[in-house]
Image (tube, rainbow, N blue to C red):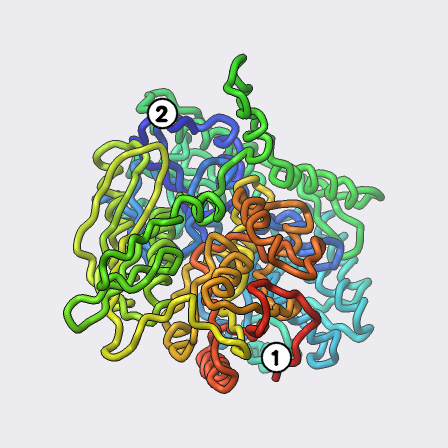
Amino acid sequence: MDSDFPLTRDLVLIGGGHAHALVLRKWGMSPLPGARLTLIDPNPKAPYTGMLPGHIAGHYPRGDLDIDLGRLARFAGARLIVGHATGIDREARRVQMSGRPDIAYDVLSIDIGITSAPADVNGFQAHGIAAKPLGPYADRWAAFVANVTAGKTAPDCAVLGGGVAGIELALAMHHRLRQIKHAARVHVIDTGPALSGVAASTSRLLRAQMQKVGIALSEGAGIAQITHDSVTLADGTAIPAALCVSAAGARPWPWLAQTGLELSDGFISVGPDLRSTCDPAIFAAGDCAHLTHAPRPKAGVYAVRAAPILHDNLRAALTEQRQFRRFKPQKSYLKLISLGGKAAIADRGALGVHLPGLWHWKDRIDQQFMQKFRDLPAMPTPPLPRETAQGVAQELSDHPMICGGCGAKVGPEALSTALAGARTGQRDDVLIRPGDDACALRIGGQVQVISTDHLRAFTADPWQMTRITALHALGDVWAMGAAPQAALVNLVLPRMSGPLQARTLAEIMAAAQEIMAEAGAEIIGGHTTQGAELTIGFTVTGLMPEGRAPVGIGGAQPGDVLILTGALGTGVILAADMRGAADGDVVRGALDHMATSPKTAAQSLISAHAMTDVTGFGLAGHLLAICRASGCGAALDMDAIPLLDGAQALLDAGHRSSLHGANRAWSEPDIEGLSPDTAEILFDPQTAGGFLAALPPQAAQQALAQMQARGIPAFQIGEMLDAPRRITLRPSLKRD
């Protein structure tokens, strides 16, 4: 989106259902200037319903089902908030969230699907799993299959619900289990007649298929209780079931009942324009919506068909147009029902047929739908002007985009040159020289440390970006062994209207206050301005415990053990994410890692001779800083260095942060044994990275044991050497 346009309206989408996924794709191809788009979903990926039976049967890996909401949101210019919406304050126009501040909206759309969990079956909450939402069911199924394969669990399943969905899943489950254990047993249970919603011929074909493979069917059966290994019917019959899956109808999510919206059997009542019948600022689509003008059964096809109308009407609401499109759903649609193996039945209206090739037809339709999200359209790069200054084309070729976070920092060589001679030495109350994590000042009888840092945003979520930046800034204070004292907030907001400024500042300050309060620091003020993009910074002070000197980078000694907390890889992951090439789960893991406080880790490393947080210059750059300041060398065990999930694969694929090359050029001359195949992670700039500490051997073992007991990831990665100020890469060190 062109940053020259001020942001003036908030569009919020709750749920990553099929309709919203298609809206996001279309939005990304033509964003609405001035609109800020937010997607809220409990997961960074949304499974596609059409391919679920094929996955359960073993025809598709899990990844084939997932729409990557992180990549899709990045493409659409939206912020993805991975979290649970718990309610709506319609008067204030706010979405209430679990574990974070409310999200304000001007226009809201809801596409959260349904749950198939039964409301009042004894024992289901403890022992059963609903087929919808699909994600938890797919995860539970994968664990069940693994246990059956290992011989830990009996291959016995029960499916509650004898509709098309239940029968299709039962056939898929039976097919997969028979590949593992010939004695697999699947039992379908329905409180009424099964397959009442399909053609008579379809019902006959499905019943015949169930009988052929040996799936039992109980109709008109009440359920008394579900345990960890059985389902007991009302007549006392016990059915073996190590896994009980419910596909019994469609139930709305309970929190909708508290919104005050007009509902029909718990589903949001919408008119032909997909707007709520009682609140024109709220839209709904997919299974969570009830079409008052054309009631239809719950089916994904209607969500897909509604998506273009929803997209256009959301834009109309944001631009205050009066013309809204009408959604006219077809009265019937073709169902292609899988039979477990690669065969299917076609059902439409009063006709049901079983023909060769139907499964492959269904597979082609499903793959074509998913391909829309696997290969997002590449947005063309704006052409260069006819004339540019010498070197512009080369610079853009070398660095086509500037990364966010520490990947946007100035390279170590340029910074080192700028800082050369910066310390005049004219004040004896300034204790730490330039190049250390923070400045240490003697004030009276106490030592105060002070540091400042800011980050160019790499996520569109200001609340999350603030949390990460605050922890990143506090890392300098903790690395010196000080206790955080006070903080100033420094903000650059993109151009936006007054109401959006207030909303954004509220999210930022809520996150800042939470992090600083947990650290024991007071926020005492700050500065704000508007600019081209979101940038968040903090100036932080801390106090040293009485009688303790600050821990700098210059105290390491030969024989000291090197400990690294956390893991590496945020730079390459964020760089790949900017290009739409990073997996959503990988990005989510990196963001969660950056948002984890290192306070306890710092307390465990209090005996360090030297310590720094690993940030923009990468592990190699920060370790060389310790070597140079301490006057000794270091050895690194590459096999011991922990990496975030997905980081190495992205490095192998050629992804690099925009600061990576400068880091390598600065560090490479002082590294022995460097191999380009294994050492690229050394130059990856980290944001809110862990600590690198040099400790005496006994203190190091105590610190590692203490952190392990507290669940803090910490690793012995090498040692300091009585050698020149260089890094030596060598075979793995023996570790306890």
| The image quarter in which residue 428 lies | bottom left
Q: Nearer the viewer, residue 686 or 418?
A: 418
Q: Nearer the viewer, residue 247 or 638?
A: 638
Q: Which mark is residue 230?
A: 1
Q: Residue at x 55, y 49 (%)?
A: 666
Residue that label 2 marks: 4
Q: Which mark is residue 6?
A: none
Tell me where residue 424 appears, x and y as whole percent. 29, 53
Tell me where residue 160 appears, x and y as whole percent. 59, 65
Seen in the picture, residue 639 relative to 660 is either above or below; the reply is: below
Q: How many marks?
A: 2
Left or right, 207 with respect to 39, comes to right
User: At numbered mark 2, what does the secondary structure look like: helix, strand or loop?
Assistant: loop
Seen in the picture, residue 559 relative to 4 is either above or below; the reply is: below
Amino acid tagged 2: Asp
Q: Residues within 10 Å of mark 1 (few under 14, many from 20)?
A: many
**Between marks 1 and 2 in the image, the one whose residue lies nearer the viewer:** 2
Between disc 1 and disc 2, whose residue precedes? 2
